[in-house]
Structure formats: structure tokens, C-alpha cells
Amino acid sequence: MTDEPALDSARKPVPAGTPDADSAAAPWWTRAVVYQVYPRSFADSDGDGVGDLGGIRAKLGYLAELGVDAVWLSPVYPSPQHDNGYDIRDYQDIDPVFGSLAEFDALLAEAHERGIKIVMDLVVNHTSDEHDWFQESRSSRTNPRRDWYWWRPAAADGGPPNGWRSAFSGPAWTLDGATGEYYLHLFARQQPDLNWENAEVRRAVYAMMNWWLDRGVDGFRMDVINFIAKRVELVDGPRPSVDGGSPMGPQIHDYLQEMHREVFAGRGGEHLTVGEMPGVSVSDAVLFTDPARAEVDMIFQFEHVSLDQGEHKFHALPLSLPALKKSLSRWQDGLADTGWNSLYLNNHDQPRLVSRFGNDSEYRYESATLWALVLHLHRGTPYIYQGEEIGMTNVRFDSIDDYRDIESLNHFREAVQEFDRSPAAVLAGVHTMGRDNARTPMQWDASDNAGFTSGTPWIAANPNFPGINTVADRAGERSIFRFYQRLIALRHESPVVALGAFSMLEPEHEQLYAFTRTLGDETLLVVANASDAPLVGPLPVDVTGGDLVLGNYAGADGSGLRPWEARLYRL
Ligand code: NOJ
């Protein structure tokens, strides 16, 4: 395999009879691909070791070359950075480590000139404990902002009001000495939860969102947005455990509809809203994304990225391909008539795709491109996480001291100190599932620190950067970046990729991921061998007569599929 993979350069026009009118009327984000930038780790323009807005601006040409339609920026607001910006001190400014509002405006203007939209991260389930609102709230039990957060007296035994656990280890409640009450934090203790029951909180958030939209931003990715509504009846108990269920309360739909009315209605419908929603079902998602209900355009669900987790997220299990297909096809089918899917296998909270679900050594190119082809051919809006487009891999630092993520560090401390587990075993879980796998510096080139910074990076680069970087990838005969470029172009050009109906084939097959997409009289077929072993032909799916549109191996090789081979046919 030395030459470029197959691409149907003489691609046929969309057949007559395809409902072009419908596809033209569909929202822009059905034809779009979104690229997530994690600013700390993307590109550092001033040598302080932390990525920044100037760095992102300098790389807009790279993003334009890739062809993405929008960039989702992880948080850049002022923050003490306990959770890398997901703990916000001030919603209406830029953290000096990332730049200034003037630099943000310049980035936005230049992105727009290049036809790239900018989607902000909206983190309003919680603020930083350094936010003025919380500082006021904690100052006394009678402060007018007391009720902006969840304060409760201790339970009868002096412990927390209920048994909720923080996503970052330990109880979800911290006793605040100053006023002798507990406050709720579903994440770190430096991230107190806002009380959305209070209409003043909601109004303040909507005002802030309107301020960013007036500034020109193109939408919001909404952090754990389903948790803004709490199951209020559980806030006051019971202890020690709370049925293991989600804290999400049923008022979530009212809140999102109100947000839509107060923020998005009347703005022309051109914005993108994507709600991150752990623990929701397909039927919940239909309600959240039904355009007639005016809540959000799409959600990030977690089912498919939880299939390889055991008792907790650091306990990795092998992925079952039939389980993955079953899950993703349920979401495809469930949102086929009403609503819309977002499509992702990577983000700043997930290990690297090619290490997790592929083979990051012998078949790195093949498995990276296989998952790209499979994911981008599903129905929904695909998201690419920085570095995914060059097949960046997980990292294995030798010591826990080399890690920075609050979730991994808290887990390590709790597991080793409180549960007496062996440090080596806990570190192995961090190697496999930790979030810092996604957060090492973007690998631009083979120079020091992967070309990310001229200073000392806030987290070390993955030592494999001399071989895996944007320059090496694109200089190679087999470029993952160019494969993504083609997938993005295909979605732009081809209504069947954006809108075609999805149908899973061979759901029980252990190696083969196969499905069709159909729109009008046009059908696309994907066949992919998601394994290190060849899939000996003939395939259980008939590809005869199909035109090969895109594949990750050059030329054909009998009737089967080579390791991690993926092909897209037009039938
Ligand atoms: C989800 C974000 O993606 C994650 O990075 C963050 O730690 C939590 N929400 C808390 O904001």
C-alpha cells in the first residue's frame, strides 16, 4: 500500500429525483462538520506554554484547508483553571492566558472571513467558586444571591444532604465553614452548581448569552446542560445512596424552551446549539432535538463511549463491535424522523480514538481512517477533535506527576489513599482512559514540543510527535488529514451523506461494520473491517456493481477486506 487510497474523482452528479429542494431547506449544520479546539493545547503564540487565541488565529488557514464549517472553542473565559476553564470566574471576558476580548473579536472576524463559524462553550451548570456570584452567595445566609446556588444544612448525622457523588471523586457536597451549610457541586468543589430554580439566575445567563451572540458568535456547545435541572426532591436526601440515577430533573425541557425564547428566537435560526447530556435516552433526545419543541439542535450523548467501561470510567474493557453497532444504530433509528444526531468518537474528555478503538501502532493510518469513514457516513453532524485528523494517539507518562487533569489526579489520590489500590494499577487506568490523552499539545511538526510552543508546555507533548504531526502526515503518501478532507467535502457535496436514511447491516457480525444511506434513488454502502485480522471474502454484504467512492487501501484485493480496510460504494 504505497499509493494514495481510492477516491472516485469522476464523482457522479446527484441523480435526478433526489429531493434537492429538501436538502437546500435543511439547516446548514446538517451539511457541516465541526472542529473542536481545546485552546490550552492547540497553539501557543506567546511562548508561555499555554495555547491561546493568537495561536488559533494563526492556524485558521490549516482549518480552512481541512474544510471544516465551524469551530467549537472549549472555554476561554477568565478562570482559575482548576478544570481547565470549565470553572468560569467571569462569563463576559477572556482569560489573559488566552488573550483579550479585542483578540477574540479579531479571531471571530478572521474566522468569518474564511467562512468558519465560531461556537462558544457555555458552562452554566456551575460557575467557579471564584465567580462574584458565588462569593456573594457564600458570604452570608441572607445574601440576596444566597439562593443562586444549592445550599443545604447538614443531614441529621452531620454529613452531606444526600448521597450524590462528584464526577471528580468524593461527595458532591462541601461544607462551607463561613455559614455552616453545604453547597452542591456535581464536579469539583471549585465548581458550585447554579440553582436554575431561581429565575434571576436564568435571566442572568440569558443576558450573557445574548451578549455573546450580539458580538457575533455562531452558537453554543452547552456543557452538561441537562444537569441544570435537578431532581429537587432528591436534593434533601436520601442518604447514603440516591438510586444511582441521573440528577436531571423534568424541568429541563421548560428551561431549554425558555432559553430558546429568550436567546435564539428572532435571530434567524442560523445558530448552532448542541447540548452535552450525560445519561439521556434516545426518547429524551427526540424531545430535546425535535425542531417543533425549540430546545436544542442536537445533543452529545454518551452511550457509545461508555460501552468499554467497567465499574467506573478508568476500568477499561474491550469494545464489543456488535454492542457499538447496536447502540449507534438505535440512536440513528430513534432520531431518523424527528430530531438530529451529533457524531463523535473523540473530544477533550475521551481517550484518543485510534488508541481506544483502533490499532495505534501497526494499523494507525488504516484504523484512524476506518473510524473516520464509518463515523462521517452516519446521519448527523460530525465533530472532529483536534489531532484526530492526523491520528494522534494516547500518551503513557511514567508518573502521575506528569498528569494535569483534575479528574485523573483526584481518582488516583482516592484510589491509592482511600481504597488502597496499587499505584501502578491505577496509573494503568489513567493511561488507557484518562482525559489528558486528549490534552497533550497538538502535534504540528517535529520541532521542539511538537511546534506547539517555544516555551515550556503546561503538559508535555506526546513523545511520538517526531513521527506523528501535521507536516509528516500531509507529506506522506497516506495522509489521514487528506482522508478527512475528502469526507468533509463529500458531506458538503452530497445530499445523501447529509440527509440519507441510515440502515445497519449485519448487526451481529464481530468484525464487519456495514450500513447503507439512501436518499431518493441514490444509495451509499459502507463496509469496514474493524479488526487486525483480514475479513475473508465473500462478504455477507453484496458490493458487486458498486462504484468505489472512497477507501483506505489502494486497489482491490479479492472479495474480502484487509485489516482495518474501509470502503464507501455508490450502488
Ligand atoms: C463536561 C466537560 O466536557 C468537561 O471537560 C468538564 O470537566 C465537565 N463538563 C464539567 O464542566
Image (cartoon, grey):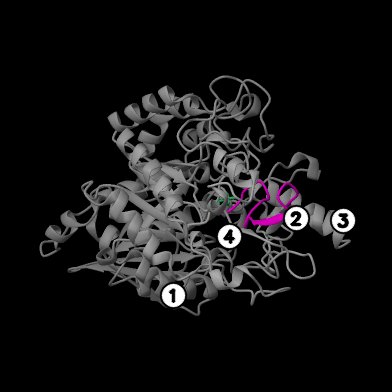
The one nearer the camera, 22 or 419, is 419
User: Residue sitting at 46 percent across and 30 percent down?
Assistant: 56
Which amino acid type corresponds to the residue marked 1 in the rendered image? Pro
Where is the C terminus found, in terms of image quarters? bottom left
Residue 78: x and y in percent read 54, 33
Disc 4 is placed on an element classified as loop
**Viewer-nearest of labels 4 and 1?**
4
Q: Which residue is mark 3?
A: 417
Residue 483: x and y in percent read 41, 46
Disc 1 is placed on an element classified as loop
Q: Residue furthest front?
A: 142
Check residue 168 for magenta coloring: no
Whichever of labels 4 and 3 marks the residue nearer the N terminus, that label is 4
Q: Which residue is mark 4?
A: 357
Residue 299: x and y in percent read 42, 60
Taken as a whole, is the magenta stretch helix, strand or loop? loop
Q: Which residue is mark 2?
A: 411
Q: How much space separates mark 4 and mark 3, taking CA atoms?
A: 31 Å
Which amino acid type corresponds to the residue marked 4 in the rendered image? Phe
**Image height of 478 relative to 13, above or below:** above
Q: Which residue is mark 1?
A: 538
Q: How much space separates mark 1 and mark 2, taking CA atoms?
A: 47 Å
Residue 446: x and y in percent read 60, 28
| Few, some or many residues within 10 Å of mark 1 (<14, 14–19, 20+) | few
Check residue 191 for magenta coloring: yes
- Res 507 visible: yes
Disc 3 is placed on an element classified as helix
| Few, some or many residues within 10 Å of mark 4 (<14, 14–19, 20+) | many
Q: How much space separates mark 4 and mark 2, taking CA atoms?
A: 23 Å
Q: How much space separates mark 3 and mark 2, taking CA atoms?
A: 10 Å
User: Residue sitting at 42 percent across and 55 percent down?
Assistant: 199
Q: Which residues are magenta?
A: 176-193
